[in-house]
Image (cartoon, grey):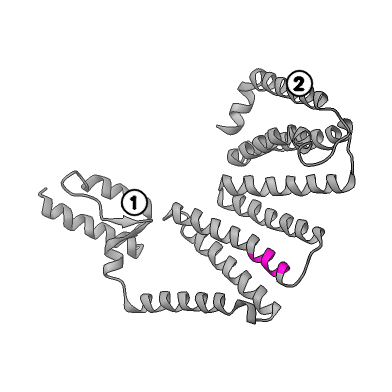
Amino acid sequence: MDAEKRKVIVREIDHWRRSKLLPEHYCDFLLNLYVDEATPKPASLMGISATSVTNSNWKIWLVIMAVIAALALSALNFNSFGMPMQIGISALFVIICYAFAYRQYNKAPVVSYLLCGVSSIALLLLGLYLMDIYDVHSSFSYIGYLAFCSVVWLFNGLIGRMAIFQICGWMGLVGTYGWLLLHKFENPGWFSLEISWIPVSIVLIWIAWLAHHTNKQAASVLLLVGGIVWFAPEAMTFLADVDMSSRVIQLSFTGKLVSAGVALFLLRKKWVEWVM
């Protein structure tokens, strides 16, 4: 088959992809059959082909410009709105970003991750900004909102199978738990910190073992977070005045590091199955 016919077929397959006349994986299979070095694949950027841009309808451009204008005007006049309006605009922006992220997940994973990141950061920063302008200075409010954001990130990561958001969600919840411990214990001792964190680490690793049959990615994240929490008591000594000497902290960290290394080595055939 000559190069000209190949180009025609490739353009037609690209049209099928854009029109969704065939599933995405079928189009990829057909492109692999007809594309060679002399017939390059259609140019695209983050899942959007050059042909779809050049042949796009003016109505699409009008809608895009209207959306950009609405976002810009909302941002410029954000402080002049009332609190319900500000909360509504913020929530709508976050929901729209998440919705587009899930819609683009199969076609353009990079765009999906980018939109999820934008919406997750916006969820946190917009909430903190609103609490600041309305003089909400209670530390419990900030920690509670962080916990809420962490749950949203975790849920988003589990639904979309995005490990980075699962890690952010779990670490946010772990940070919330750590803050509550510091708030409860003014000068915690070695035993108090260990008994507060080690069971949490064991529970997370146990949940990872339960989850590895159905979701290896979630199991990997839980195993990682459980390992981090294992060393959380020693990490908390950098954040608060603790009733223990530096020698005890060093010995505790060394002992836990050695025990973790030995456990990982002896059980390597088990935990490798969880994550791979």
- What's the amino acid at mark 1? Tyr
Residue 65: name its quadrant.
Answer: bottom left
Are the residues flagged by discs 1 and 2 in contact, CB closer than 8 Å? no
Q: Which is nearer the eye, 255 or 265? A: 255
Residue 210 falls within the magenta-colored stretch: no
Residue positioned 27% across, 49% down in the render = 30
Residue 130 falls within the magenta-colored stretch: yes
Of mark 1 and mark 2, the one earlier in the sequence is 1
Query: What residue is disc 2 on?
Result: 255
Vertical position of residue 30 compared to residue 225: above or below? below
Residue 52: name its quadrant.
Answer: bottom left
- Identify the secondary structure beneath mark 1: helix
- What's the amino acid at mark 2? Gly
Residue interval drawn in magenta: 126-132
- Identify the secondary structure beneath mark 2: helix
Q: Position of residue 44 (x, y in %)?
A: 31, 56
Query: What residue is disc 1 on?
Result: 26
State the quadrant of the C terminus. top right
